[in-house]
Image (spheres, grey):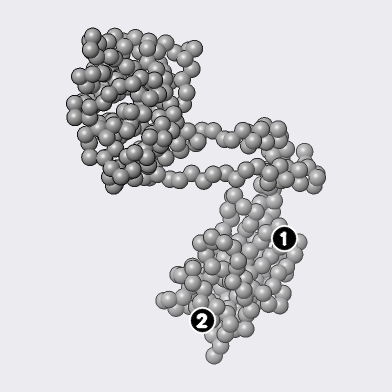
Amino acid sequence: MTLSLDQITHLLNGLKSLPPLRKQEQTFMEIAGYPHFENVCSNILQFYLQPSNEHGFGSLLLDSLFTLINEKVVINGQNIDVRREESTSEGKRIDLIIESDDFLLGIENKIFADAYNRFDKYAEHLNKYLRKDRQVYKVLLSVFPIDTSKAKLHGFKPITYQLLFEQVIANIGSYFLTGREPHTIFLRDFIQTIQNLQEATSMDESRLLYFADNHESISTLFAEVIEMQKDMRKKVKQLNEVVLSDAVFSDIDQSPYPIKSGFWLPSAYLVAVSWYTIVISNSLSLQFDVVLTPKGWFFRFFDLRNKKNPKQVENWVNDRRIKVELNSEKNSPINFLIYKGENDSLPYSTSSEDSGRWALDMLKRLTDSLD
């Protein structure tokens, strides 16, 4: 099966109409390699749930939790104990317990795991703290919503991190001047890490609908793209064979400068490159790319040792009367110089012999010592 031009145009227009993907901000927790572990998240919660700790946010997180539980609790930050992994009589562990003279709050923390725990045993353990003058509260904190029709929670109130963070952000204004660096940054990083976990497993509805409606055509288009890439790679390799067969490579004395060659054949783009590195001096390695796209062939140059500053390369090609223009691509990691002189491009269908000789002529101009 192949796609008509109208079908391809329809696919591409649909893709263009989708809202732009929001680029996820990589967090320090993700860089460190600990985004998914419940223990790490519980340790962070323990620190910020203790009002007397040096973060400067006081009872911000506790106030936010009790707002979501819909309970009015007076919090005395000097008389609160926040502890981790308290064992039940059966040897099970409750992730977090916040205890004061006035209340006790037990929190079971779930990042990705389902709510399969024995919540009846957790509740039984927590209820031992119940007194006439002290209420016991139970929270199941999770990244994703819990299906309460399938899970027996025995009094644990399910709250998502999203709801908690929304409440924290709503309440944080009064703590703006008391929050201390770097703990403000750490809290923001923790919030962003959890948000990334939520977003990493879901796409916006418009994208899901687009791919659901067009998945067969998209698969066909992918297959055609792969065939196009194979043809492009074959052509650049054939070009390279023509170039390497010349004396400039077979006889080192024919070139005053060492030359290395190779390929850049990315899988994510419709582009194939046969590259040649000309080592001119200790400070200048001129990279000469012969680039093939579906539009055809062209040349580009850059300084392999200083990719953002093409000045030395520009001087070199100008001395050899090779006309170039600086590329206009925004946010490019390399400042390329594009050849804009005579015969500055060739059609895609050009034979390997002709394209190879075309590239070889430029290579010889670049290695001219001007003696």
- Which residue type does callout 2 highlight? Pro
Reply above or below: 121 against 183. Answer: above
Q: Residue 78, how many percent across, how many down?
A: 19, 29
The span from disc 2 to disc 1 (Cα, nearest Å) is: 34 Å
Q: Residue 320, how many percent across, how many down?
A: 59, 83
Please give left or right for residue 46 compared with residue 320 in the image.
Answer: left
Residues 308 and 258: in front is: 308
Residue at 52% over, 65% down: 334
Reply above or below: 143 against 366. Answer: above
| Secondary element at tag 1 | loop
Please give left or right for residue 79 compared with residue 345 in the image.
Answer: left
Residue 295, label in figure: 1
Residue at 22% over, 40% down: 54
Residues 14 and 34: in front is: 14
Residues 354 and 287: in front is: 287
Upstream in sequence: badge 2 or badge 1: 2
Give the quadrant of the N terminus: top right
Mark 2 crowd level (few <14, some 14–19, many ≥20, 10 Å Cα): some
Q: Residue furthest bottom?
A: 371
Reply above or below: 12 against 334. Answer: above
Q: Residue 130, how many percent across, how many down?
A: 25, 11
- Which residue type does callout 1 highlight? Lys
Residue 230, label in figure: none
Residue at image mark 2: 256
Circles 2 and 1, Cβ within 8 Å, touching? The answer is no
